[in-house]
Image: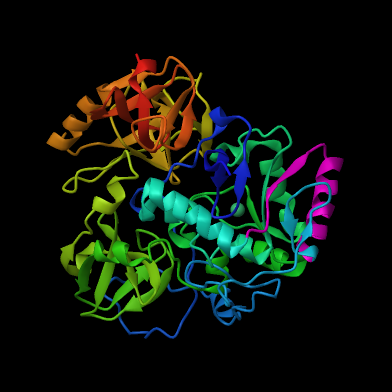
Amino acid sequence: MNFASLITCSGGPMKQSHASKITLSAILPAALMAAVLPLSPATADPVVPAPAEVAAQSVTMDSAVQIASKKIQRDPGKTDVFVNRNYPLSPKKYAPKTVAVKGTNVRLKSSAASAYSKMVKAAAKDGVRIRAVSGYRSYARQAELYNYYTRIYGQSYASKISAIPGTSEHQTGLAIDVGNHNRACGLQACFANTPVGKWVAKNGHKYGFILRYPKGQESVTGYSYEPWHFRYLGTTLAKSYKNSGAKTLEAYYGVAGNGSKNNSDKKSKGTAKTTANLNMRSGAGTNNRILLTIPRGKSVQLTGSKKSGWYQVRYSSKTGWVSGTYLRDVSMPSTTKKKESSKDNKPKSTQSKSAKTTANLNLRTGVGTGNRVILTIPRGKQVAISGSKKSGWYPVAYAGKSGWVSGQYLSGFSDSAPKSKSQKQKSSSKAASKKTIANLNMRTGAGTNHRVVLTIPKGKMVALTGTQKSGWYKVKYSSKTGWVSGKYLR
Ligand SMILES: [Zn+2]
């Protein structure tokens, strides 16, 4: 088996015939995500009177109470089984009975397979050709993949693109990765803007499928945006989910997100203490919904995100925002873990620069409209600026992706923070880049005996990390780091 030809989502592996098309999703730390967290439901958390941060308006009742009473299905044999990192399959090595999806090698449970075929037919009527990319995957197969990614990228990153064995939805036989018939944007964020990506996102629920890892919900689902991964829930539940307005299945069931639940992440978390009964809200500001009230004197975990004086915190298995005015002993989390996967390490002492989009704005892989569109940022959204301007374009992070946008459509720059040393260093290190003069394999080590991570197309700029060995360079490209032969760099 040639691992290099496999891509996985938290989900499934995929064979691609064109190595040059392989681009794994860029992963950025939750700290960079502008996303507003989904509503957490009412819980048994203590309701303490007279919170210090008093909202102008009273709490509005909503469906949250109902949500809280939803039963979480743990039986892996049931269509509504709930699976994520915190809710592994039980038994761990559960193996369903599966059938091949009509006309493919992809296997699913028969209920999901026939629903899927129905969906394919309906899409075809609209002129949209859905391709089945990956379905059921066994525990053993998942273990193989997960170990592979861990070896290459380290556990922290691997766990964002690949499920830990026993926690993959694909093991239930109820999840499928879909693609376009012509493979456009296969397993990439830009898939969302392709005919199949759009059609399934809009219509999938009618056939019982929901988009399981949405954009902007990475900190809740624990996975990068996967517009191709659909989970079969049956039509009743899928419609109920869609109608609930919940952004994730986690939110729908009222369970905490699992974006950074592993122990190594916990160690790097910061903490603070509340100095008053303090409202935790769904966003930074009193206009956001109250999720719960944290009693005075409690310790909260800081996620590392801060916005206009508000901190994103975890408390009692909920994540939300609190006013920094009522926190003391604030120690922000160390960012060492995140640095490996982010081009965007901002200096700890300064707040990140940001701006607002003044139009629906394409985020591209490089400077100029000749580069591929990663996604379209809606007008009026806040984006994090991650480096220095180049020919009028800015490097930005949005919804867990990073890329370039035209500065013409940005306004409201909050760049008052003085340029720190590390920012200067960063821009100078940015200059250290070279161009590929051929389709060039990036490998896990210096030499052709190492595994291929991805193939960098000819004519692309790669960032040099400064490490060099026997004529090979350690480079960064498309949020991956690996080794390429210096012979093909200019
Ligand atoms: Zn998947």
Magenta run includes residue 309 = no
- Which of the 4 image quadrants contains residue 175? bottom right
Q: Can residue 265 be seen in the rendering of this structure?
A: yes
**For this view, does 70 lie left or right of residue 418?**
right
Report the residue at 51% width, 34% height from top.
374
Q: In the rendering, at what x and y percent does residue 321 appear?
A: 34, 64
Q: Nearer the viewer, residue 356 or 458?
A: 458
In the depicted structure, whether residue 135 falls above or below residue 356:
below
Whether the magenta-drawn stretch holds residue 115 is answered as yes
The residue positioned 87% from the left and 42% from the top of the image is: 125
Q: Is residue 156 above or below residue 471?
A: below
- The location of residue 14, given as percent across then percent down, is 62, 44
The image quarter containing residue 233 is bottom right
Of residues 334 and 59, the one nearer the viewer is 334
**Colour logic:** rainbow
Judge from the rendering whether residue 171 lies leftward or rightward of residue 374; answer left or right. Answer: right
How many marks are shown on the rendered structure? 0
User: What range of the chain is rendered magenta?
Assistant: 111-137
Residue 105 image point, x, y percent: 75, 49
Instruction: Quadrant for residue 410, please give it.
Output: top left
Point out residue 296 in the picture as x, y percentages from the top left corner.
23, 80
What residue do we see at 52% from left, 55% from top? 144
Pick whichever, 202 or 424, lies toward us.
424
